Image (spheres, rainbow, N blue to C red):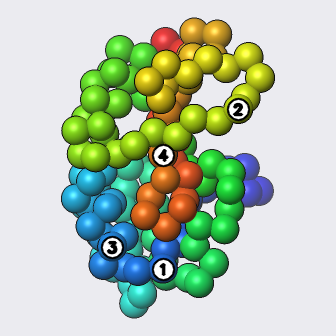
Amino acid sequence: MLSDHAPMPVLAVTDMDRAKEFYEGTLGFTAEEPFPGALTYTAGGVPIFVYQSSYAGTNRATAISFIVPSDVFDREVADLRSRGVRFETYDMPEVVFHDGVADMDGMRSVWFEDPFGNIINVGTDGS
Protein backbone atom coordinates (compact mmCIF):
# COMPACT_ATOMS: atom_id res chain seq x y z
CA MET A 1 0.00 0.00 0.00
CA LEU A 2 1.13 3.53 -0.66
CA SER A 3 0.82 4.37 3.03
CA ASP A 4 3.85 2.12 3.64
CA HIS A 5 6.14 4.38 1.60
CA ALA A 6 7.56 7.85 2.24
CA PRO A 7 6.39 10.54 -0.20
CA MET A 8 8.85 12.74 -2.06
CA PRO A 9 8.10 16.46 -2.42
CA VAL A 10 8.39 17.63 -6.03
CA LEU A 11 9.00 21.27 -6.92
CA ALA A 12 8.81 22.70 -10.43
CA VAL A 13 11.16 25.53 -11.46
CA THR A 14 11.70 27.42 -14.71
CA ASP A 15 15.47 27.94 -14.43
CA MET A 16 17.73 25.23 -13.02
CA ASP A 17 20.67 27.61 -12.43
CA ARG A 18 18.49 29.97 -10.35
CA ALA A 19 17.01 26.96 -8.55
CA LYS A 20 20.47 25.69 -7.69
CA GLU A 21 21.45 29.16 -6.43
CA PHE A 22 18.36 29.37 -4.19
CA TYR A 23 18.21 25.82 -2.84
CA GLU A 24 21.96 25.50 -2.34
CA GLY A 25 23.05 29.10 -1.74
CA THR A 26 20.06 30.47 0.16
CA LEU A 27 18.66 27.37 1.88
CA GLY A 28 21.97 25.53 2.24
CA PHE A 29 20.95 22.22 0.63
CA THR A 30 23.46 19.95 -1.11
CA ALA A 31 22.62 18.59 -4.55
CA GLU A 32 22.73 14.84 -5.02
CA GLU A 33 22.98 12.71 -8.15
CA PRO A 34 21.39 15.13 -10.59
CA PHE A 35 19.20 13.72 -13.32
CA PRO A 36 19.08 15.41 -16.72
CA GLY A 37 17.06 18.59 -16.15
CA ALA A 38 16.57 17.92 -12.44
CA LEU A 39 18.24 18.08 -9.03
CA THR A 40 17.63 16.10 -5.88
CA TYR A 41 18.23 17.29 -2.35
CA THR A 42 17.70 15.61 1.00
CA ALA A 43 16.24 17.30 4.08
CA GLY A 44 15.63 15.33 7.25
CA GLY A 45 16.21 12.09 5.40
CA VAL A 46 13.50 12.88 2.82
CA PRO A 47 14.42 13.49 -0.82
CA ILE A 48 13.19 16.62 -2.59
CA PHE A 49 13.00 16.49 -6.38
CA VAL A 50 13.44 19.80 -8.23
CA TYR A 51 12.80 19.78 -11.97
CA GLN A 52 12.31 22.21 -14.83
CA SER A 53 8.75 22.85 -15.97
CA SER A 54 6.81 25.63 -17.64
CA TYR A 55 4.15 25.12 -14.91
CA ALA A 56 6.46 26.24 -12.09
CA GLY A 57 4.81 28.40 -9.45
CA THR A 58 1.25 27.77 -10.58
CA ASN A 59 0.30 26.08 -7.29
CA ARG A 60 -0.81 28.90 -4.94
CA ALA A 61 -0.88 26.60 -1.91
CA THR A 62 2.01 25.43 0.26
CA ALA A 63 4.19 23.10 -1.80
CA ILE A 64 6.51 21.87 0.96
CA SER A 65 6.70 22.21 4.75
CA PHE A 66 9.62 21.80 7.10
CA ILE A 67 8.58 20.97 10.66
CA VAL A 68 11.19 21.98 13.25
CA PRO A 69 11.32 21.76 17.04
CA SER A 70 9.98 24.86 18.76
CA ASP A 71 13.33 25.52 20.45
CA VAL A 72 15.13 25.95 17.09
CA PHE A 73 12.38 27.79 15.20
CA ASP A 74 13.65 31.31 15.99
CA ARG A 75 17.17 30.35 14.95
CA GLU A 76 15.90 28.93 11.62
CA VAL A 77 13.82 32.05 10.97
CA ALA A 78 16.79 34.33 11.77
CA ASP A 79 19.03 32.29 9.47
CA LEU A 80 16.53 32.53 6.61
CA ARG A 81 16.20 36.30 7.13
CA SER A 82 20.00 36.67 7.10
CA ARG A 83 20.03 34.93 3.71
CA GLY A 84 17.56 37.43 2.29
CA VAL A 85 14.37 35.36 2.58
CA ARG A 86 11.23 37.51 2.90
CA PHE A 87 8.23 36.02 4.66
CA GLU A 88 4.71 36.18 3.30
CA THR A 89 1.61 36.92 5.36
CA TYR A 90 -1.86 35.71 4.55
CA ASP A 91 -5.37 36.58 5.62
CA MET A 92 -6.19 33.52 7.71
CA PRO A 93 -8.89 33.42 10.38
CA GLU A 94 -7.59 33.31 13.94
CA VAL A 95 -3.95 33.59 12.86
CA VAL A 96 -1.92 36.55 14.08
CA PHE A 97 1.26 37.55 12.22
CA HIS A 98 4.12 39.34 13.98
CA ASP A 99 6.99 40.42 11.71
CA GLY A 100 6.06 37.69 9.20
CA VAL A 101 5.71 34.92 11.80
CA ALA A 102 2.26 33.37 12.24
CA ASP A 103 1.11 32.43 15.72
CA MET A 104 -1.59 29.78 15.63
CA ASP A 105 -2.59 29.07 19.20
CA GLY A 106 0.99 28.45 20.32
CA MET A 107 2.34 26.92 17.12
CA ARG A 108 4.37 29.20 14.87
CA SER A 109 5.03 29.21 11.13
CA VAL A 110 6.52 31.26 8.33
CA TRP A 111 5.87 31.04 4.61
CA PHE A 112 8.08 32.22 1.77
CA GLU A 113 8.39 31.71 -1.97
CA ASP A 114 11.29 30.35 -3.95
CA PRO A 115 12.24 32.36 -7.07
CA PHE A 116 9.62 30.44 -9.06
CA GLY A 117 6.59 31.04 -6.83
CA ASN A 118 6.64 27.70 -4.97
CA ILE A 119 5.40 28.37 -1.45
CA ILE A 120 7.58 26.92 1.31
CA ASN A 121 6.61 26.69 4.98
CA VAL A 122 8.66 26.30 8.14
CA GLY A 123 6.61 25.53 11.23
CA THR A 124 7.03 24.30 14.76
CA ASP A 125 6.30 20.74 15.77
CA GLY A 126 4.34 21.84 18.82
CA SER A 127 7.03 20.75 21.31
Residue identifier under label 1: 14
Residue identifier under label 3: 18
Q: Nearer the viewer, residue 18 or 12?
A: 18
Residue drawn where x is 22% and y is 38% of the image: 82
Dot 3 amino acid type: Arg
Q: Is residue 117 visible?
A: yes
86, above or below 114, in the image:
above
**In this rendering, which labeled residue sits more in front, label 2 or label 3?**
2
Looking at the image, tell me whether mark 4 or mark 3 is earlier in sequence order.
Answer: 3
Looking at the image, tell me whether mark 2 or mark 3 is earlier in sequence order.
Answer: 3
Q: Secondary structure at mark 2?
A: loop
Question: Are there few (<14), some (14-19), or many (20+) residues within 10 Å of tag 4?
Answer: some
8, above or below 66, in the image:
below
Residue drawn where x is 37% and y is 56% of the image: 42
Residue identifier under label 4: 112
| View extreme (bottom): residue | 36
Residue identifier under label 2: 91
